[in-house]
Image (spheres, rainbow, N blue to C red):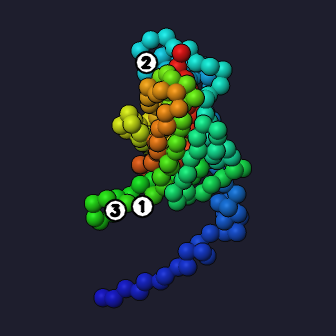
Amino acid sequence: MSTTTTLVDPFLAFTEEALERKRKTSSPTVKAVTRTEAIAIATKVVGRPSVLPETAVMTLTARHPYDPAGFMDVYKPGRWDCESNLVFMNVIVQGASPGEWDGTAVYARFTAPSAGKYLFIGNFSGHQITLNLGGPWGTSTGYCPTTADHAQATALSNMTAGQTVFFGCTMTGWIIGYLESLQVYLIA
């Protein structure tokens, strides 16, 4: 008994209206933590009540990737979207050989204007996405269950005045994540 298979052109499977709805999808809304939220994070991470200045020492975003205190470079961004102020990051996928990988990586630099303890925050979103924030502190992670949520990965670094720290971030999980900003606060 033989069967006949009919191939359907996938582009004909969608109506014009359905394609238009897919084309007009919007980027998720991701927001950086507020100063109040940053104080709560610092207090939790440090283990004692913390005080933060009114603004971050450095904030890097898609619209503002450079700052007098540092900058970020992005290897293979999925999309650099200034309209939504997001860097779309493809997740890291391991290759067949050790050290072989594909995906988006952020490389950042920060120079401390004064001595102290600094709180590094990566603000992001994505469906089942983990942000890996790596630097001299090792790797810290933050997890985001859905694109409707906003999450953070945080790290601490004791620095001297003029000291430069190189740090970076990648994402793992499903297909893509959204980086809103990298913030650095001086903890008093």
Measuring from the top left, give residue 50's x and y in whole percent.
Answer: 51, 14
Relative to 75, residue 148 above or below: above
Residue beneath the point at 57% across and 34% down: 183
Relative to 104, residue 139 above or below: above
> Distance of mark 1 from mark 2, alpha carbons?
35 Å
Q: CB under 8 Å between callouts 1 and 3?
A: no
Measuring from the top left, give residue 47's x and y in whole percent.
Answer: 41, 15
Query: In this orientation, does residue 148 appear?
Result: no
Measuring from the top left, give residue 101's x and y in whole percent.
Answer: 37, 60
Q: Quadrant of residue 55?
A: top right
Give the amino acid at mark 1.
Asp
Q: Mark 1 sits on what residue?
A: 102
Q: Mark 2 sits on what residue?
A: 46
Relative to 117, residue 170 above or below: below
Q: Mark 3 sits on what residue?
A: 100
Measuring from the top left, give residue 127's x and y in whole percent.
Answer: 49, 45
Residue beneath the point at 51% across and 57% down: 75
Residue beneath the point at 38% across and 33% down: 137
Q: Nearer the viewer, residue 102 or 70?
A: 70
Disc nearer the start of the sequence (2/3): 2
Instruction: Report whether 134 appears left or right of 110.
Output: left
Q: Quadrant of residue 114?
A: top right
Number of numbered discs: 3
Q: Residues within 10 Å of mark 1 (few under 14, many from 20)?
A: few
If the image is split into quadrants, where does the N terminus sit? bottom left
As drawn, the residue found furthest toward the bottom would be 2
Residue beneath the point at 70% across and 69% down: 16
Q: Nearer the viewer, residue 97 or 91?
A: 97
Give the amino acid at mark 3.
Glu
